[in-house]
Amino acid sequence: MASDLTRGLSRNAAGYGDRDFALYLRRSFARSMGYSKPMLDRPVVGIVDTASGYNNCHRTVPELIRAVERGVLAAGGLPLAFPTISLCEPALFPTSMHYRNLAALETEAMLFAQPMDAAVLAGGCDKTVPAQLMAAASADLPVVGLVTGPMLATPFEGERLAACTDCRRYWAAYRAGRVSAERIAEIEGRLATTAGTCGVMGTASTMACVAEILGFLPSGTASIPAVHAERLVAAEAAGTLAVRLIDAPIRPSQLITPHSVENALTVLLALGGSTNALIHLAAIAGRRGVPVDLHRLNALSDATPVLVDLKPTGDGYMEDFHAAGGLPAVLYELRDLLHLSAVDITGTTLEQRLATPPPFVDRRYIRARDKPVSPVGGLVALLGTLAPRGAILKRSAATPALFEREARAVVFDGLEDLARRIDDPALDVVPEDFLVLKNAGPRSAAGMPEAGYLPIPQKLARAGVQDMVRISDCRMSGTAFGTIILHATPEAAAGGPLALVETGDRIRLSVAERRLDLLVDEAILARRRTLWRAPPVPARGWDRLVAEQVLQADEGCDLGFLTAAAH
Ligand code: FES
């Protein structure tokens, strides 16, 4: 029996009422797996295994785990991998977002329940990394993040393609009649040709960079392509580092601080990163009681230039970003805007990491401060009578000519209504209208899908209209683009002002003033409010728990009983 009962397999004895017996039983069962007694006396590193036949983005997880195991064994630990839920973005109904909190809940429970002294979190697709960081924040166990890494772009007839900005670009062209059915079918097989997460600065890569700036990933590892040998070297090093953390722990509670969260916002803005990252960051920070303030976001956005020129807003792919210097090169440019005392999982401060300039930076993809892609940040929060607790616009992916205007609302009551009417030739819509989608927020049955990228009505698309103002309480893929206002909070299903908007109402947007206002008399709104009915709560299961507990976008859409406030 191990002498230290707080370590390794001796931690968290099962509740048989006799601790010695519980550990005796555990060890004898562990022996059945062929481990020697000295091996079972080692400290334990749990490895979260998110491989799944449903998850293309996690195709390399099995070999990553073998590499982590190598690192753990070489450093004197016992690696024990265990499965958790795996969330592949396009594979889940109604949307992967609906299950992020389930993954966080399950991962936290297993980090807590099973005996382990530290853990490596292997994940990658959009919701997986946020769920793992939320779990780690609550379990407060030393963890090392290990992302699967982005896919490589595919050379194709003189251009390059990668999921999923190019998916959207080609699909929009197909809808507009500029690409044939044969061509779109051919391109389907060229968009995602290697293992790994989407190949642009979408949500997965944005969250990998957020995880790195928060300190969970060792420096420079966020963007290593999934299929590079360097990715396996990072996995081995993650295993070694996890063993080191057992004697010198750095816990999530030390990594998630007001300063590190503000650093993450600054990085998000400089990347021109995904709007989804705001929700996920609020959820991760919320687990440690650190708020994400939208007024502060706007102040940071005014002071932070976009430095990264990648799709969906620019030209490059994640492999270009990595070869250009990756996140360390971006951080070096931003160093005067960052809180340099923040530490990472190796115990190194940002100041130490940024003491010397990166050896090489490709300025095509990572700009210098004096030659930014944009002098201001990629995201802004809008507040006003239509979104009293905020809505988000990715201005770096939007059309500035649409930023200051008042227009008529054309309203869709939900996803089914949208699908039924958007391409109806009889739809009363002109390019100047604002398309409004409601009942697609976190509490709705739709589960806050990435439907905020409302398609341009087909008759307008065919007439050449490429962008319109679109407003909703749902999300947008990090790989999408357009003048799209998301996360209107409170959502319609919670009785927010969005629930009261009707076709023909006037809405005023001013990005300069950070305002989004519904120009309808309060007396009319009060009358509509008396007629509004909350959607029914599902009868059972996960859907019911979500409907009863899910918080709004400004609070990260976490479940209320999982936040720090619930402790
Ligand atoms: Fe997994 Fe895009 S679908 S990262």
Image (spheres, rainbow, N blue to C red):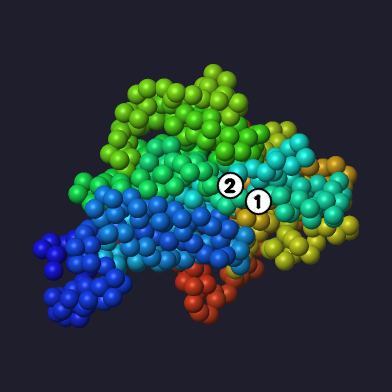
Q: Position of residue 538 (x, y in %)?
A: 55, 76
Task: Kindly tell me whether mark 2's CB lies below 8 Å from ligand 1.
Answer: no
Q: Position of residue 496 (x, y in %)?
A: 57, 58
Asked whether, in this view, residue 370 is left or right of residue 403, the answer is left
Q: Where in the figure is residue 68, as x and y percent of width and height?
A: 37, 53
Residue drawn 74% across the image and 45% down it: 169
At a point 58% along the width and 58% down the height, the residue shown is 56
Mark 1 or mark 2, earlier in chain: 2
Q: What residue is at 61 percent from the left and 50 percent from the top? A: 194
Q: Are marks 1 and 2 in contact (CB under 8 Å)?
A: yes
Q: Which mark is residue 107?
A: none
Residue drawn at x 44%, y 32% as measured from the top left:
328
Image position of 467 (left or right of 424): left
Q: Which element carries disc 2, helix, strand or loop?
A: loop
The amino acid on which the numbered mark 2 sits, given as a three-letter code, is Met
Residue at numbered disc 1: 192
